[in-house]
Amino acid sequence: MVYRFRYNSLKVIAAVFACTFVFISCGKSLSSDNILQLKRLTNSNTGPYLLQTDHLDLIDSLRLDSSQLSLEFNRLITGADSLLNVSFSYVTEKPKLPPSGDPHDYMSIHRYAYPDSTGAYTDLIDGRTNPEFYEYDKPKLERISAAVYSLSLAYYFTKDEKYALKASTELKNWFLNPGTRMNPNMNFSSIQWGVHEKPGGSGIVGALDFIDMIESASLLYDSPHWTADQHFKLKEWFFEFYIWLHNNYPPQSYGGSNVSTWLDAQRVIYLLFTEQENHLNSSTHIEPVSQRIGGQFESNGGLPREASRAIPQHYVYFNLKAYMYLSLLRKNHYLKTGDDRDWPVLKDCATADCTYGGLKAALDNVASYIQGANKATLFNSDPGFNSCRYLEIFRPAATAFESAEYEQVVNYLVEQNHCRNSNILLAFPAPL
């Protein structure tokens, strides 16, 4: 991995002083250790963290000999072109203010909550989304994250600044610009009016979209439209967001569900991005993945917490996708440092029978289901589920674990099911 530095010591020192002052003046209780970590922020680019640039750099040559990659490349560019004139919405545009009264505070409505006769959102119908959900911030974040990621990939592959301009504009609008920026918290995620309007909630899973936005900032780093100062300010934002996350969601939060796995993936990339790698192997910050796997998977690959949901196929897929994100983050950190607590466990548990739980058994069962060898035994299948979403599991798995077995699943999805996903197939090339 190549590191790129654009360093101005006076700017960094001034920015650190300002950021420290902001934290203290806003009543944030920071330990001396946290302040020390803050002072270590630089405006250098230490990412991307999920992707490997040497993989991305192969695409130009590989697509010349691959009709599939050529098709995906053209689809990516066509899609990126269609985004150039799209207007996006930000957290400040809501039909109703959060309980704080601050429009800059992110707010999402509990996806499955409906009002009762009193108007309180007490009726929970798992698997059925309340249409009001789409009026608030979670769908906006999903949309802008997906767009910025596609635009950033298009920029990385083509070096065409029009893509960088649009992507960087949206990053700045969401995180940095005073008129539209989001405050670095999710105090009002997944609220239920009249029931649960206090800070917190399982809606923190919505922050998973930040993972691709951090990756995007790293891909944009060489563009004049994304400056070193802006990269530094984004690190400041995520440093404060991580403090909020750490104080509100201990490592054991939501231990049996996909929310905890996505929280782990978030914690890893936030610590990497804000140059706090020394916390990555600390149980104070992230629960060991052996405990996470052991608390979720049965030996046969079953995920009982997800399988009991109203749409179990979606939640089993969603949790396995989180494990693949976590695997890529941990593997790339291991390749960089040779010291990562969780990568050896993830590698073993995804490629062999490990003593912690049935991660490989789960992947094998889903792979068999996709290829028609047997009916799924881990979940009741949902006729409305789009099986092409399994590309988001098995292509990263093939890349992370250098697995011909998982690549075979990818080929089946592409060739037999005619699945397409430019962001996945281009960002994670097949194992050589």
Image (cartoon, rainbow, N blue to C red):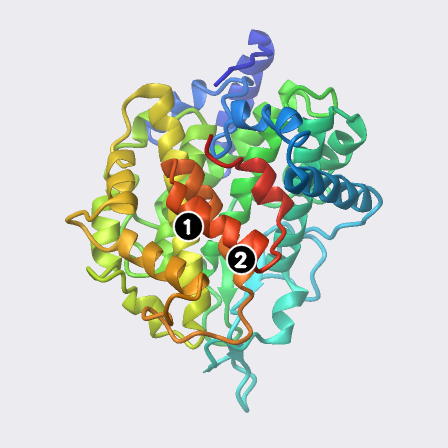
Q: Is residue 354 left or right of residue 84?
A: left
Q: Quadrant of residue 310?
A: bottom left
Q: Is residue 423 left or right of residue 371?
A: right
Q: Residue at x 25, y 52 (%)?
A: 293
Q: Residue at x 33, y 26 (%)?
A: 334
Q: Are marks 2 and 1 in contact (CB under 8 Å)?
A: no
Q: Residue at x 66, y 52 (%)?
A: 143
- For label 1, the crowd category at 10 Å Cα-Cα, with few meaning under 14, some 14 to 19 and many 20 or more, is many
Disc 2 marks which residue? 389
For the residue pair 363 and 275, the one nearer the viewer reads as 363
Note whether residue 266 is visible: no
Q: Is residue 194 left or right of residue 179?
A: left
Q: Position of residue 177 (x, y in %)?
A: 70, 37
- The residue mark sitting in front, 2 or 1, is 2
Task: Identify which amino acid the numbered label 2 is placed on.
Answer: Arg
Note whether residue 293 is visible: yes
**Secondary element type, mark 1:** helix
Farthest-out residue, right: 85
Q: Position of residue 61 (x, y in %)?
A: 64, 24
Q: Quadrant of residue 212?
A: top right
Farthest-out residue, bottom: 117
For the residue pair 248 and 221, the one nearer the viewer reads as 221
